[in-house]
Image (cartoon, rainbow, N blue to C red):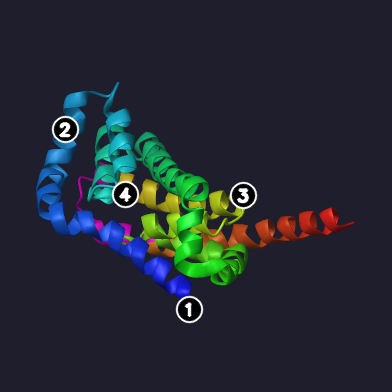
């Protein structure tokens, strides 16, 4: 299936910066240094620095969860969580939009129109929402899945809802861990892994029903 090659190429493109500069960025943006850097920016500007880092994670090997926890360290679990979720959402939306607008010709050349149609069916169904929601807490996958969703033209409303289902628990969980002083990382992993599918299980069916209704109306 040529769609797999498209996925593989996206994964390689995301992995290259990690291979080249991963160690340097991991050292530069460890927990202590990231907390210190945002604190030096002050509460007036730390949110902008944190969101900027989360957006940069699209092309640079920046540890996003460390940035999210640093936002919680500076602002507390609620306000820090809002900024963390905002950064995660904007990062996913940017990847989706860029690939929707600029990547379609390359995607057709790599996967072919027939396999892209299969990808559209996949991301337009229930599986697409689950993949987007669950990908937010997996390494590498947030960028790859968001780009793939844009390339296969996943319905925008479904993408945003699924993205929110993954980003909300992830952002607030790691902001809370940051506020706790990074003493309970296991709790963050359990909650960030478990809440995205739970949220999508609640919201996903409603989104699918609305989409089915809108398709039915358009056919009448």
Q: Looking at the figure, which quarter contains the C terminus?
A: bottom right
Secondary structure at badge 3 equals helix
Which residue extends farthest bottom? 1
For label 4, count other residues whose C-alpha is less than 10 Å away and answer few (under 14), some (14-19) or many (20+): many
Percent from the top left, x then y, of residue 149? 50, 58
Q: Nearer the viewer, mark 1 or mark 3?
A: 1
**130 to the left or right of 15:** right
**Which residue is label 1 attached to?**
1
Residue at 47% from the left image edge and 60% from the top image edge: 107
Q: Earlier in the sequence, mark 1 or mark 3?
A: 1
Give the residues in magenta: 176-192
Image height of 20 relative to 37, above or below: below
Which residue extends farthest right? 220
Q: Earlier in the sequence, mark 2 or mark 3?
A: 2
Q: CA distance from mark 2 to mark 4?
A: 18 Å
Q: Is residue 196 visible?
A: no
**Which residue is label 2 attached to?**
37
Give 142 or 185, whichever is nearer the viewer.
Answer: 142
- Verify whether residue 38 appears in magenta: no
Mark on residue 157?
A: 3
Q: Earlier in the sequence, mark 3 or mark 4?
A: 3
For label 1, count other residues whose C-alpha is less than 10 Å away and answer few (under 14), some (14-19) or many (20+): few
């Amino acid at each position: 299936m040529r769609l797999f090659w498209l996925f593989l190429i996206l994964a390689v493109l995301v992995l290259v910066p990690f291979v080249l500069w991963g160690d340097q960025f991991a050292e530069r943006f460890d927990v202590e240094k990231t907390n210190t850097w945002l604190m030096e920016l002050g509460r007036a500007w730390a949110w902008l620095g944190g969101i900027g880092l989360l957006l940069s994670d699209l092309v640079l090997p920046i540890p996003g969860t460390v940035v999210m926890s640093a936002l919680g360290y500076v602002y507390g679990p609620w306000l820090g969580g809002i900024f963390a979720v905002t950064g995660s959402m904007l990062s996913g939306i940017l990847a989706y939009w860029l690939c929707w607008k600029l990547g379609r010709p390359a995607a057709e050349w790599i996967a072919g129109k027939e396999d892209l149609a299969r990808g559209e069916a996949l991301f337009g169904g229930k599986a697409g929402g689950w993949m987007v929601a669950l990908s937010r807490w997996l390494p590498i996958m947030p960028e790859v899945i968001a780009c793939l969703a844009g390339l296969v033209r996943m319905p925008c409303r479904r993408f945003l809802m699924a993205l929110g289902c993954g980003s909300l628990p992830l952002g607030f969980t790691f902001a809370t861990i940051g506020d706790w002083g990074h003493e309970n990382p296991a709790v963050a992993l359990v909650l960030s892994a478990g809440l995205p599918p739970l949220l999508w299980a609640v919201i996903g069916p409603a989104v699918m029903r609305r989409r089915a209704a809108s398709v039915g109306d358009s056919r009448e």
